Image (cartoon, rainbow, N blue to C red):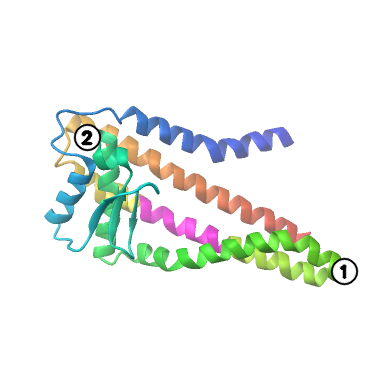
Amino acid sequence: MILLAVALLLAIFLLPNIWAKWVLDRHAGPRDDYPGTGAELARHLLSRLGIEGVQVELTEQGDHYDPQARCVRLTQDHFEGRSLTAVTVAAHEVGHAIQHHRGYAPLMARSRMVAVAQQAEKVGALLMMAAPFLFLLTRTPGGMLIVVLAAVISFGTAALVHLVTLPVEFDASFQRALPLLKDYIPPYDMPGARHVLTACAFTYVAASLASLLNLGRWLVILRR
């Protein structure tokens, strides 16, 4: 049963990311019939939609939209690439820019929560490391309980951010990016674009499950 549980957890954590990488690589071949790169499509879409002040930049930190800097950031393969993966990922990140421009409430909530969650995760990690030493020093179960409870709260904040992220990502992919792509890629590429967007969404699903499992582990500790 223990081995089965470990195998299940590994499958939950690893398989969505492995599958997503396989899908992205599968559709990453250069396409001579595409008129522009991912970056060029992103700039064109922003201009077409009248979203001013949003830059498109090259990054090494992973594809993302930065709402504070108002910037769509793409990795080199997607910034310079002329492939189905490149234009689909670019359209997805523009989808986040559209959400920001239109005041999409879940995106605004996530943006406010991310900074809090980052600090909470750091506090949680410190509390986990400090808990055994504090218990040995104080020999008081109540003190240990407070430490574990604080860790649960910090990891719970991270889990909440991941849960809020899911509707944000699905909306950017399937309500914003996919309808836009219909005007720029051939109809026979639309299933592939949906495939890419679905694969990317599953990585966030895996992250959410991992965060919830981590929170559940600490709740079990707290109950004991």
The magenta-colored residue range is 156-169
Q: Is residue 191 magenta?
A: no
Q: What amino acid type is highlighted by mark number 2?
A: Arg
Q: Residue at x 64, y 59 (%)?
A: 125
Q: Earlier in the sequence, mark 1 or mark 2?
A: 2
Mark 1 crowd level (few <14, some 14–19, many ≥20, 10 Å Cα): few
Position in image of residue 123 (x %, y %): 62, 65
| 202 w.r.t. 150: above or below | above
Front-most of 72 and 195?
A: 72
Front-most of 127 and 61?
A: 61
| 112 w.r.t. 74: above or below | below
Q: Residue at x 85, y 68 (%)?
A: 137
Q: Which mark is residue 112?
A: none
Q: Residue at x 18, y 33 (%)?
A: 187
Asked if residue 35 shows in the view, the reply is yes
Q: Helix, strand, or loop for circle 2? A: loop
Asked if residue 180 shows in the view, the reply is no
Position in image of residue 223 (x %, y %): 75, 61
Front-most of 195 and 88?
A: 88
Position of the N terminus, as image quadrant, is top right
Mark 2 crowd level (few <14, some 14–19, many ≥20, 10 Å Cα): many
Q: Is residue 165 magenta?
A: yes
Residue on which the image places disc 1: 139
Residue on which the image places disc 2: 82
Q: Characterize the magenta stretch by its predominant secondary structure.
A: helix
Position in image of residue 90 (x %, y %): 26, 45
Left or right: where 197 falls relative to 18: left
The answer for how far apart the CA atoms under marks 1 and 2 are is 63 Å
Position of the C terminus, as image quadrant, is bottom right
Q: Helix, strand, or loop for circle 1? A: loop
Q: What amino acid type is highlighted by mark number 1?
A: Arg
Q: Quadrant of residue 109?
A: bottom left
